[in-house]
Image (cartoon, rainbow, N blue to C red):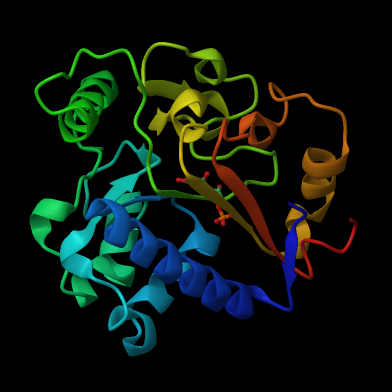
Amino acid sequence: MGPEIHADADVLARQAAQRLAELSGEAIRSSGCFTLVLSGGSTPNRLYERLADAEFSRKLDWGSIHIFWCDERCVPPDHPDSNYGMAFKSFIDRVPLPPRNVHRIRGEIKPRVAATAYEKKLRTFFFPGHADLPGVPGFDLILLGMGEDGHTASLFPKAVALHEQKRWVVAHHVKELESWRVTLTPRVINAAHDVFFLVTGPEKAGCLKEVLQGPYRPDELPAQAICPASGRLKWMIDAEAAHLL
Ligand code: 6PG
């Protein structure tokens, strides 16, 4: 599927919210619930704000929607950098989502402990009573952003986590940011039914061209490591980010 190019970031956010609403309806009709995985960053945040607008909020069956995170910065939930905190303010606090449906990564505890605890939470949710099964969770929809260096989730260039085959969630220190992050591994992201990459702004254009049209170098451009095994991958881009394609 070729990238979908939208006039600007607002149009893109509306289109993504519309598609998300359709996918949630389909998933809830077939399995009774919709598992949605969020990212941090400003591009996904515009979409979260749309979800709380009456137009979309009324369409969504919040009681059947479960919210997870792709990655978290290792800070408390009320810290301005917290991905959970951002989503909470943009929509979770503004819609009738039952608190038990919100499954956050605990950025306030030791990173490795938070990663292990989050993986345990996911295993219990997806394989209740059989948490040791070797499979991976099949999230309904994962939302991803992309940094100017080609990182996605908290998978930064040269991250060892890019090659992790066993664990679903890892903690690692990101040298460039001098901070710890907890992230899902590509193996888990690639098992999702649908993945949206949301990319906006002229500063992303050069990297986007490399990721989509350059040689395959996932260690340098982690966004290239995202390639769902049997799910669908959709690139949603605004005109500014797309201008070199
Ligand atoms: C994070 C992320 C990260 C983000 C991209 C894009 O916590 O920072 O999950 O992967 O989505 O960096 O962020 P922007 O849309 O702000 O550029």
Observer-nearest residue: 177 or 212? 212
Residue at 25% of width from left, 39% of height from top?
105
Observer-nearest residue: 179 or 98? 98
Give x and y (percent) for residue 159.
56, 20
Give x and y (percent) for residue 47.
47, 69
Q: Is residue 71 visible?
A: yes
Tell me if 36 is positioned left or right of 148 in this view: left
Observer-nearest residue: 195 or 129? 129
Q: From the viewer's perspective, is residue 171 above or below residue 12?
A: above
Residue at 19% of width from left, 52% of height from top?
102
Which quarter of the picture shows residue 33?
A: bottom left
Q: From the viewer's perspective, is residue 152 above or below residue 19?
A: above
Give x and y (percent) for residue 220.
72, 25
Residue at 47% of width from left, 12% of height from top?
165
Q: Residue furthest bottom?
A: 54
Query: Count of labels shown?
Result: 0
Residue at 21% of width from left, 75% of height from top?
95
Tell me if 35 is positioned left or right of 157 in this view: left
Q: From the viewer's perspective, is residue 220 above or below residue 24?
A: above
Q: Is residue 82 visible?
A: no
Q: Residue furthest front?
A: 30
Q: Quadrant of the C terminus?
A: bottom right
Tell me if 48 is positioned left or right of 92 in this view: right
Give x and y (percent) for residue 218.
70, 25
Which quarter of the picture shows residue 103?
A: top left
